[in-house]
Image (cartoon, helix red, strand yellow):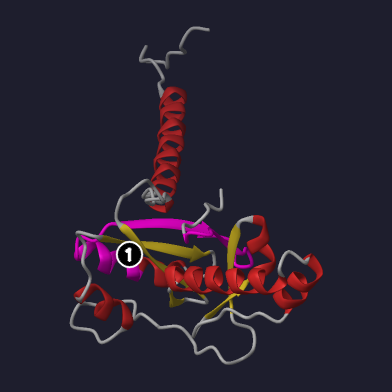
Protein backbone atom coordinates (compact mmCIF):
# COMPACT_ATOMS: atom_id res chain seq x y z
CA UNK A 1 0.00 0.00 0.00
CA UNK A 2 1.46 3.40 -0.86
CA UNK A 3 1.96 6.14 1.66
CA UNK A 4 -0.74 8.85 1.76
CA UNK A 5 0.19 12.48 1.10
CA UNK A 6 -1.54 15.49 2.62
CA UNK A 7 -2.79 18.49 0.71
CA UNK A 8 0.72 19.96 0.42
CA UNK A 9 2.08 16.72 -1.04
CA UNK A 10 4.09 15.73 2.13
CA UNK A 11 4.16 12.05 3.15
CA UNK A 12 2.41 11.24 6.44
CA UNK A 13 4.82 9.15 8.62
CA UNK A 14 2.65 8.99 11.76
CA UNK A 15 1.88 5.27 11.36
CA UNK A 16 5.55 4.45 10.78
CA UNK A 17 6.57 6.39 13.90
CA UNK A 18 3.90 4.58 15.90
CA UNK A 19 5.40 1.22 14.85
CA UNK A 20 8.92 2.38 15.83
CA UNK A 21 7.65 3.53 19.21
CA UNK A 22 6.06 0.12 19.87
CA UNK A 23 9.24 -1.70 18.83
CA UNK A 24 11.30 0.50 21.14
CA UNK A 25 9.01 -0.33 24.05
CA UNK A 26 9.26 -4.07 23.35
CA UNK A 27 13.06 -3.86 23.17
CA UNK A 28 13.17 -2.05 26.52
CA UNK A 29 11.05 -4.80 28.12
CA UNK A 30 13.36 -7.48 26.70
CA UNK A 31 16.44 -5.66 28.05
CA UNK A 32 14.88 -5.30 31.52
CA UNK A 33 13.83 -8.97 31.63
CA UNK A 34 17.30 -10.09 30.55
CA UNK A 35 18.90 -7.92 33.23
CA UNK A 36 16.69 -9.41 35.94
CA UNK A 37 17.52 -12.99 34.87
CA UNK A 38 21.24 -12.18 34.80
CA UNK A 39 21.10 -10.71 38.31
CA UNK A 40 19.48 -13.90 39.63
CA UNK A 41 21.96 -16.26 37.97
CA UNK A 42 24.15 -18.10 40.49
CA UNK A 43 27.69 -19.12 39.67
CA UNK A 44 28.31 -22.73 40.64
CA UNK A 45 31.78 -23.48 41.95
CA UNK A 46 32.73 -27.14 41.57
CA UNK A 47 33.34 -28.86 44.89
CA UNK A 48 36.43 -31.04 45.26
CA UNK A 49 35.62 -34.70 45.80
CA UNK A 50 37.40 -37.70 47.24
CA UNK A 51 40.38 -38.64 45.05
CA UNK A 52 43.43 -40.85 45.23
CA UNK A 53 46.07 -39.54 47.62
CA UNK A 54 48.93 -40.98 49.60
CA UNK A 55 48.28 -38.62 52.50
CA UNK A 56 46.59 -39.88 55.67
CA UNK A 57 42.90 -38.89 55.70
CA UNK A 58 41.55 -37.02 58.71
CA UNK A 59 37.77 -37.40 58.64
CA UNK A 60 35.49 -34.61 59.83
CA UNK A 61 31.72 -34.88 59.65
CA UNK A 62 29.56 -31.79 59.05
CA UNK A 63 26.26 -32.70 60.69
CA UNK A 64 23.55 -30.53 62.21
CA UNK A 65 25.64 -27.51 61.16
CA UNK A 66 28.42 -28.60 63.51
CA UNK A 67 31.80 -30.29 63.05
CA UNK A 68 32.41 -33.75 64.48
CA UNK A 69 35.91 -35.27 64.51
CA UNK A 70 35.94 -38.94 63.52
CA UNK A 71 38.86 -40.99 64.79
CA UNK A 72 38.29 -43.68 62.16
CA UNK A 73 41.69 -45.44 62.49
CA UNK A 74 41.17 -45.95 66.22
CA UNK A 75 37.60 -47.21 65.80
CA UNK A 76 38.80 -49.57 63.05
CA UNK A 77 41.59 -50.84 65.33
CA UNK A 78 39.21 -51.41 68.24
CA UNK A 79 36.70 -53.24 66.03
CA UNK A 80 39.41 -55.46 64.57
CA UNK A 81 40.82 -56.38 67.99
CA UNK A 82 37.40 -57.05 69.51
CA UNK A 83 36.28 -59.20 66.59
CA UNK A 84 39.47 -61.24 66.76
CA UNK A 85 38.92 -61.78 70.48
CA UNK A 86 35.32 -63.00 70.23
CA UNK A 87 36.15 -65.15 67.18
CA UNK A 88 38.82 -66.97 69.19
CA UNK A 89 36.46 -67.37 72.15
CA UNK A 90 33.70 -68.75 69.92
CA UNK A 91 36.08 -71.33 68.47
CA UNK A 92 34.17 -71.57 65.20
CA UNK A 93 30.74 -71.82 66.86
CA UNK A 94 28.58 -69.39 64.86
CA UNK A 95 25.86 -69.20 67.55
CA UNK A 96 28.38 -68.22 70.23
CA UNK A 97 29.91 -65.71 67.81
CA UNK A 98 26.57 -64.00 67.13
CA UNK A 99 25.72 -63.94 70.85
CA UNK A 100 29.06 -62.35 71.66
CA UNK A 101 28.61 -59.91 68.79
CA UNK A 102 25.30 -58.72 70.24
CA UNK A 103 26.99 -57.82 73.53
CA UNK A 104 29.98 -56.10 71.92
CA UNK A 105 30.25 -52.31 71.80
CA UNK A 106 32.95 -50.31 70.05
CA UNK A 107 32.56 -46.59 70.72
CA UNK A 108 34.38 -43.34 71.29
CA UNK A 109 33.25 -39.92 72.47
CA UNK A 110 31.04 -39.21 69.45
CA UNK A 111 30.52 -42.45 67.51
CA UNK A 112 29.72 -46.15 67.73
CA UNK A 113 30.46 -49.00 65.34
CA UNK A 114 27.64 -51.17 63.97
CA UNK A 115 29.44 -54.51 64.06
CA UNK A 116 26.71 -56.40 62.21
CA UNK A 117 28.20 -54.97 59.01
CA UNK A 118 31.70 -56.01 60.02
CA UNK A 119 31.00 -59.61 59.05
CA UNK A 120 30.25 -58.27 55.55
CA UNK A 121 33.65 -56.62 55.33
CA UNK A 122 32.46 -53.10 56.14
CA UNK A 123 33.03 -50.76 59.06
CA UNK A 124 29.81 -48.80 59.60
CA UNK A 125 30.13 -45.84 61.96
CA UNK A 126 27.06 -44.09 63.38
CA UNK A 127 26.58 -41.20 65.82
CA UNK A 128 26.12 -42.44 69.38
CA UNK A 129 22.48 -42.81 70.35
CA UNK A 130 22.77 -43.46 74.07
CA UNK A 131 22.63 -39.76 74.95
CA UNK A 132 26.22 -39.57 76.20
CA UNK A 133 27.74 -37.97 73.11
CA UNK A 134 28.55 -34.25 73.40
CA UNK A 135 27.50 -31.82 70.70
CA UNK A 136 29.94 -31.12 67.91
CA UNK A 137 31.88 -27.93 67.43
CA UNK A 138 30.33 -24.75 66.06
CA UNK A 139 32.15 -22.58 63.53
CA UNK A 140 31.33 -18.88 63.31
CA UNK A 141 30.47 -17.81 59.76
CA UNK A 142 33.21 -15.17 59.77
CA UNK A 143 35.84 -17.34 61.47
CA UNK A 144 39.45 -16.31 60.98
CA UNK A 145 42.69 -17.73 62.36
CA UNK A 146 42.38 -15.39 65.31
CA UNK A 147 39.12 -17.18 66.24
CA UNK A 148 39.04 -19.70 69.06
CA UNK A 149 37.35 -22.79 67.63
CA UNK A 150 38.01 -26.45 66.86
CA UNK A 151 38.88 -25.98 63.17
CA UNK A 152 41.43 -23.23 63.85
CA UNK A 153 43.17 -25.33 66.54
CA UNK A 154 43.21 -28.37 64.23
CA UNK A 155 44.70 -26.47 61.29
CA UNK A 156 47.29 -24.62 63.35
CA UNK A 157 48.86 -27.96 64.31
CA UNK A 158 48.12 -29.74 61.01
CA UNK A 159 50.89 -31.53 59.09
CA UNK A 160 49.79 -30.81 55.53
CA UNK A 161 52.74 -32.71 54.07
CA UNK A 162 51.50 -36.03 55.45
CA UNK A 163 47.80 -35.51 56.10
CA UNK A 164 44.68 -34.33 54.30
CA UNK A 165 41.19 -33.46 55.47
CA UNK A 166 38.13 -35.34 54.23
CA UNK A 167 34.92 -33.41 54.92
CA UNK A 168 31.87 -35.66 55.12
CA UNK A 169 29.07 -33.17 54.48
CA UNK A 170 25.47 -33.89 55.36
CA UNK A 171 22.97 -32.01 53.20
CA UNK A 172 21.78 -30.00 56.21
CA UNK A 173 25.23 -28.59 56.97
CA UNK A 174 26.55 -26.62 54.01
CA UNK A 175 27.03 -23.48 56.10
CA UNK A 176 29.54 -25.04 58.49
CA UNK A 177 31.12 -26.88 55.56
CA UNK A 178 31.86 -23.61 53.75
CA UNK A 179 33.60 -22.21 56.83
CA UNK A 180 35.69 -25.35 57.36
CA UNK A 181 36.62 -25.52 53.68
CA UNK A 182 37.62 -21.84 53.55
CA UNK A 183 39.86 -22.12 56.62
CA UNK A 184 41.52 -25.27 55.24
CA UNK A 185 42.17 -23.63 51.88
CA UNK A 186 43.72 -20.61 53.59
CA UNK A 187 46.15 -23.01 55.28
CA UNK A 188 46.83 -24.70 51.91
CA UNK A 189 45.62 -28.02 53.32
CA UNK A 190 44.43 -30.67 50.87
CA UNK A 191 40.67 -31.05 51.24
CA UNK A 192 38.43 -33.76 49.83
CA UNK A 193 34.64 -33.66 50.09
CA UNK A 194 31.94 -36.32 50.21
CA UNK A 195 28.25 -35.30 50.19
CA UNK A 196 25.80 -37.49 52.12
CA UNK A 197 22.09 -37.46 52.82
CA UNK A 198 21.31 -36.52 56.42
CA UNK A 199 20.28 -40.11 57.24
CA UNK A 200 22.77 -42.05 55.14
CA UNK A 201 25.13 -44.33 57.06
CA UNK A 202 28.89 -43.95 56.79
CA UNK A 203 30.59 -47.06 55.43
CA UNK A 204 34.33 -47.62 55.57
CA UNK A 205 36.52 -50.54 54.67
CA UNK A 206 37.80 -52.54 57.63
CA UNK A 207 41.06 -50.65 57.17
CA UNK A 208 39.26 -47.34 57.73
CA UNK A 209 38.93 -45.98 54.17
CA UNK A 210 35.64 -44.22 53.39
CA UNK A 211 33.44 -45.88 50.79
CA UNK A 212 32.00 -43.19 48.52
CA UNK A 213 28.28 -42.44 48.77
CA UNK A 214 28.10 -42.48 44.96
Give the residue number, with chain letter if any, for mark 1.
181
Q: Secondary structure at mark 1?
A: helix
Residue 205: % across, % down = 53, 56
Quadrant of res 55: bottom left
Determine whether 96 is above or below 26 in the image: below
Q: Residue furthest right?
A: 95
Q: Residue furthest bottom?
A: 132
Point 46% across, 36% down: residue: 26
Residue 47: % across, % down = 39, 52
Point 46% across, 27% down: residue: 19
Sort mark 1 into few (<14), some (14-19) or many (20+) by Cα contacts within 10 Å. Answer: many
In-image side of 47 versus 87 (left or right):
left
In-image side of 60 versus 101 (left or right):
left
Determine whether 16 is above or below 172 in the image: above
Residue 148: % across, % down = 25, 87
- Report the span colored magenta: 179-208
Determine whether 12 is above or below 60 in the image: above
| Nearer to the camera, 92 or 213 | 92
In-image side of 93 versus 123 (left or right):
right
Amino acid sequence: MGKKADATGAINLDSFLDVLTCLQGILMLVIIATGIDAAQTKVLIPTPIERQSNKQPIYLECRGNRIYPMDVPELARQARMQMMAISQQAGGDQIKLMQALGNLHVTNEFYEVDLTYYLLGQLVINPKTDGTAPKGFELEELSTFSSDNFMVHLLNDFDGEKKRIVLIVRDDSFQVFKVAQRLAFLKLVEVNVEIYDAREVLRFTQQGVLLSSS
